[in-house]
Image (spheres, helix red, strand yellow):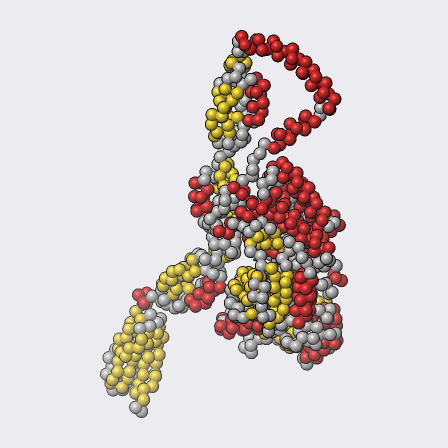
Amino acid sequence: MKKMPEMLLGNRYRILEGIGEGGMARVYRGMDVKLNRPVAIKVLYEQFAGDPDFLRRFKQEAKAAAKLSHPSIVNVYDEGEEGNIHYIIMEYVDGYTLKEVVQRNGRLKPADAAQIILQICDALVHAHSQKIIHRDIKPQNIIITGDGRVKVTDFGIARATVDATITYGKSLLGSVHYSSPEQARGYCADQKSDIYSLGVVFYELLTGEVPFSGESPISIALKHLQEDIVPPGKLVEGLPAELENIVMKATHKEQNLRYSSAAQFRDELEEWLKNEKDLNYGNNSLVKRMRSYTLYKDRQGFDKDPFEEPKETMPDKKRYLRKKKYFSKKILIYTGLLVFLFTMLFAGYKFIHNFLHVPEVSTPDLQGKSLAEAEEELESLGLSYRIAREEYNETVPKDHIISQEPPAERSVKRGREIDLVLSLGPDLVEVPYLIGSTQLEARLMLSELGLNMKVDREYSDEIAPDYVIRQDPGKGFQLARGEGVHVVVSDGKRPFSLRDFRNWELEDVREWLNLYELVLRNIDEEYSDEIPEGRVISQFPASGEMVQAGDNVDLVISKGIDPDSYKTYTFEIDPLVSPGQVIKVYVEDVEGTKTVFEGTYLGELITAEGVGSGQVVLMELRNDEYQIIDVLIFP
Amino acid sequence: MLRFTVRSHPGCIRDKNEDCYFIPPEKGPFIFAVADGMGGHAAGEVASSLSIEALEKNIARFSDKLQSYSLNEMKNFLKESILKANKEIFDIQSQSSDLKGMGTTFTVAVFFHQELLIGHIGDSQAYLFNESGYVQITEDHSLVAELLKNGEIEPDEVYDHPQRHLLTRALGTSSSLNIDFYTEGIKPGDCILLCTDGLTNVLRPAEIRDIIFEYDYRESNNLEKVADRLLNKANELGGPDNITFELICYDKF
Ligand SMILES: Nc1ncnc2c1ncn2[C@@H]1O[C@H](COP(=O)(O)OP(=O)(O)O)[C@@H](O)[C@H]1O
Ligand SMILES: [Mg+2]
């Protein structure tokens, strides 16, 4: 990241270090020296700073955003310019963007995802009440702090860019993973657009994937317009139906079939969360578990706890309580009286009987029952129990009975203690972070944990071949030994067919290979009768073979014609000049020029040898000058 | 025989001309190109001129071979020239913060015996005009064109769509590039127009055709008149953007 000069912006803001780059600005951590508090400084790229129209809108939006004040919205403090530097001063949020969290972790647990979305809903409710539309809700604009709070940045700022291009000229269609259909169609965003985008973010948190992906932004934009979203429950087994409904409603293509307001979205989430909490979470602090999300970055893993869902036996208890309520009060009173009478009658008899002999009972079959059920059953028979040991078991759920001693249907004396073996549930291990490891490393890590790996491969322009691109489930999820993690491994860049280099100059091939990111490995040289020296005779892989960036290419280059293959031609020359004349005979062939005869011709036969190809030249001295009188070309 | 003429003008609103063009060197081959830069500040100008320079360099480099190329080799040559330009522009913009985000449209045409070969990225355009009418050879790589093609907007929404400046593809904006190629048979009497959207945003193809035929471009000097008329007309209509176009006539042998 480019370093900014040491200086105070607006006489009070010091730039400390770069923390991110976005679509139109670079973000720095900084210090407000006047108030002595950390701030985030967003500095517009120079290219925008030249456009007064853009700057005006940018400032206008920054001012509007500055009016928002909400715990889930990043505060905008100030805005200004210093020479050519245009900046916004914001609250500094120490944390990770939701994008980073999902990238590192994969999908989140439904309740955690819901909690995060709930807070963003809160932020939207506030902003919408001030008539400010965000327009660019996406995980990159949502920061989660170390203490689990959610902060939304960039309110309304997207508008400045959108409007600017109208007067400012072309720009490239950017990322549209979170754009609503109406925005994809190119028209204005409103509150409902924010709701749609938030629905998409929710989808991603729940499934680890955005609903629409494709080769290019335009193909994604068209999918937002034309394709139905695959319900998140189809991707994640056991996803609560209520959450799926919420996502589907928020991401409805028809604006008026979505939630009518962020508040309505919020309310449904809250409703679900309330039930969910009662059911599963008890008062386990969300903040505590959220903190762990933001710990991933350190890569040393995180506390084991935060992800483990507290397993309580709440559901059973609730059902039990509910049943009881069916008895009306009256009935309760009558039965109470009756029971009392019987007990009194019976007690006398029982007292004496017990005194005489301890009765025997038949042991119940407790296998597979929950500890609570077993306890109840044993108690009613007058038996007690002891937990002999606890062990992992794949089939018997946690806190249920695996086996008992003595077994079922044995006669035992009342008061006898039954030994129980209690299940710890399946032997859960925590899924490790595999992204960025090689396939082999990932396999090793998983096999060490007793987990299986299912591998799919896909082409990737960013990730080197054999490295893990994605995983599901993500780090931190608990799986039983023997279960599998699905990883997608890079197959390198998309292959293409290699062209024919025959007869190319080596330099041209080099340049071409460079352009297509292929590596020139071996160059062999061979003689060739057909291909001129220095050009390509053959190649490996052959032309038409599929290759990928990074592949090797071998070439065979011509050394010209093989000297050993040259034929030697012998000529017997009768110069046909009168003896006494001075003549010269020389041969030009592939080996050079050789004079065969020079001097006075006495009538003999002259023998000449030529190699490969060339000519024999016969010259006669006339007036002190050699003149060519015959040329013989061979072969 | 080919006759051609070119015009490039900043228009009436902008003070800079970020368009660039290429016309064939004297000894051939018959290669033409237009490029319309994008990116704030000076970035657009840099990108469009880099793209044209890259083409020029590659032509110079292979000049002795180009004459003997087959159509397929010519296509490969174009592809490589464009990929080189893309790489060069992308490398520069990823290293320079002033030039971040720059890119350019690029439409290049080669006249090859009786064929016209076109390589194309972005929303500059190639049209073919003749007596029987006109056809836009290239497909725009723009949001609006895609929406229209997919039935999401109506044809009459195209010209004042709020996001008609959004491109879906450009040269120099990413390391990989997908180039469209077109081959058209041409016959004597055909007139090819390569232009940036500064012309076509104000003049509809039918109006352009009328101007071309008003002056009968087949008469040798009229091609210049046609070009002047087109440029003036575009500027009379406001000239909101840079205007660059090349008119190429394919005459009888
Ligand atoms: N107020 C802030 N406090 C801390 N970090 C921030 C703040 N705002 C933005 N960032 C960081 O800077 C990065 C770039 O931000 P931004 O320019 O808004 O990007 P984009 O254009 O993708 O929205 C963010 O991904 C985030 O990591
Ligand atoms: Mg942002």
- The residue sitting at 49% across, 22% down in the picture is A419
Q: Is residue A153 left or right of residue A104?
A: right
Report the front residue among A494 and A102. A102
Residue A323 position within the rendered picture, expressed as x and y whole percent measured from the top left: 68, 26
Report the front residue among A624 and B39. B39
Q: Is residue A156 left or right of residue B99?
A: right
- The residue sitting at 29% across, 72% down in the picture is A570
Q: Is residue A203 left or right of residue A558?
A: right
Residue B136 quadrant: bottom right
- The residue sitting at 29% across, 80% down in the picture is A585
In the image, residue A599 above or below residue A230: below
Q: Quadrant of the C terminus of chain A?
A: bottom left
Residue A616 quadrant: bottom left
In the image, residue B71 above or below residue B1: above
Q: How many marks?
A: 0
Report the front residue among A416 and B109. A416
Report the front residue among B215 and A354. A354
Residue B207 position within the rendered picture, expressed as x and y whole percent measured from the top left: 74, 71
Residue A490 position within the rendered picture, expressed as x and y whole percent measured from the top left: 50, 51
- The residue sitting at 73% across, 74% down in the picture is B238
Q: Is residue A315 visible?
A: yes
Residue B141 position within the rendered picture, expressed as x and y whole percent measured from the top left: 64, 62
Q: Is residue A214 visible?
A: no
Q: Is residue A217 left or right of residue A533?
A: right
Residue A171 quadrant: bottom right
